[in-house]
Amino acid sequence: MQPVIKNSQVNRIDVIRPDAPNLAGYGDYHVGVRTLTLIDENRVDVLNTQQGQPNTLYDRSLTVEVWYPAALGREESPGGEYRTITRNPEISTTLIGQGVRDAAPNLTIGRCPLVVISHGYPGNRLLMSHLGENLASKGFVAVSIDHRDSTYDDQQAVSSTLYNRSLDQRAVIQRIDELSEDESSVLYGLVDASNTGVVGYSMGGFGLINNLGGGFSDVALSSPMAPPNELLAEHAARNPLYAEHLDPRIKAGFAIAPWGMESGVWLAEDLAGITTPTFYVAGDNDTISGYERGVRAIYDNAVNSDRYLLTYQNAGHNAGAPYPVPWEILDSPTGEGADHYMDPVWDNVRMNNVLNHFATAFFGLYLNADSSMSKYLDLSQEGVNATNAPPGDWPGFPQGSTVGLTLEKLLRGSA
């Protein structure tokens, strides 16, 4: 028997399996990556606001990872590392990908659509780094957020996340838009923030649904988890000012296991406010966000939008979003935190490959107006419901590689 060589593994986020669909691989552009800190001034400080007292305000800082098409110098080559904290905050990991730290942007291709990536509770900005790099290689600027009070090493009461998540997403869009017009910024001339998509996983999906027009119900406002002073009323369907605060720059939503429907955050009628095209991703064994009364219920009731539902059969809450479990956790005495990245049935790399494929198609169609992408999304003859598309009949998928997947589509006005 060969001896086990510890610490020899490599945590790659860019692995493409031989059976991956066509759009899963990296695109034509080199990938640059930078870490920025963005400030949203005069935000309500939920954690330091007391019920019945005036709201405390603060400047909320958000660390973001920015992936973009890059122009590499003669001495630069693709590839780089990301050092980050894991779900077990006592364990750090090094991820290996294609991004080149602080590479010069490729400004020859014009302004790129913006895709904002929003993690779960808890999570961090690198949890979906496989997607960020992948999209940047295809001509998008992907910006992934460390949501304050909601990361592995600073997780606080969920009340802060409930109030701040949709605001963080909108604030990042605004700040990136400003930087794209600032001649002193590395992002100057690179980003078209008027053409934005948002990816939200779990609690990130909760914020996304709210930003797409899903105003919160009175059940959410009265929840024991809700922040003080009825702060969630700002995001509520009954608030006449709620719709005015939505950001018209968001042209497409990609909601992965969005949390909240099973917990009463939305009633069916609240979801009628969503008019933006949305791609939903779920595992039908998701015990966190729920499936039939959770993600599928959001999909079914968002009747005023064109929408898709990709289901990983028998998968749980981690379907598609997290990169594979780091070896540093597997190599630890207890393995604590491993379940945050793993699925009992599905291989993470396969799930990531499928997710990257459909994100490429969806944002290609709705942000780039590339009609050639529609063939990957409209699988049935009518383009309405492709649940029963047989294995091998999906464009871009090798024969037999769609086993365990279903893809559905409903048009605006359909229920």
Image (cartoon, rainbow, N blue to C red):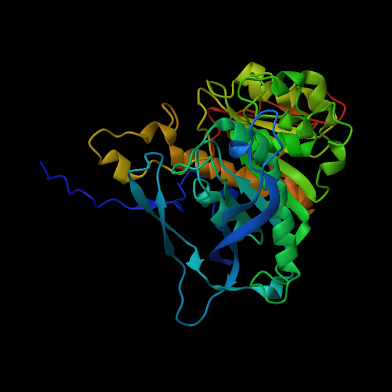
Q: Nearer the viewer, residue 245 or 261?
A: 245
Q: Residue furthest front?
A: 53
| 66 with respect to 410 (left or right) | left
Residue at 32% in and 33% down: 336
Write down the quadrant of residue 31 in the picture. bottom right
Residue at 43% in and 64% down: 80
Q: Is residue 392 above or below residue 247?
A: above
Q: How many marks?
A: 0
Write down the quadrant of residue 358 in the picture. top right
Q: Is residue 98 above or below residue 255?
A: below
Residue 232 seen anywhere in this rendered image of the structure: yes
| 76 with respect to 232 (left or right) | left
Q: Nearer the viewer, residue 407 or 260?
A: 260
Q: Is residue 217 above or below residue 340?
A: above
Residue 265 seen anywhere in this rendered image of the structure: no
| 179 with respect to 251 (left or right) | left
Q: Residue furthest bottom?
A: 74
Residue at 24% in and 52% down: 8
On-image quarter of the N terminus: top left
**Residue 332 place in picture, x, y as percent:** 25, 40
Residue at 49% in and 38% down: 155
**Residue 160 place in picture, x, y as percent:** 60, 36
**Residue 36 place in picture, x, y as percent:** 57, 62
On-image quarter of the C terminus: top right
Q: Is residue 177 above or below residue 411?
A: below
**Residue 298 place in picture, x, y as percent:** 72, 25
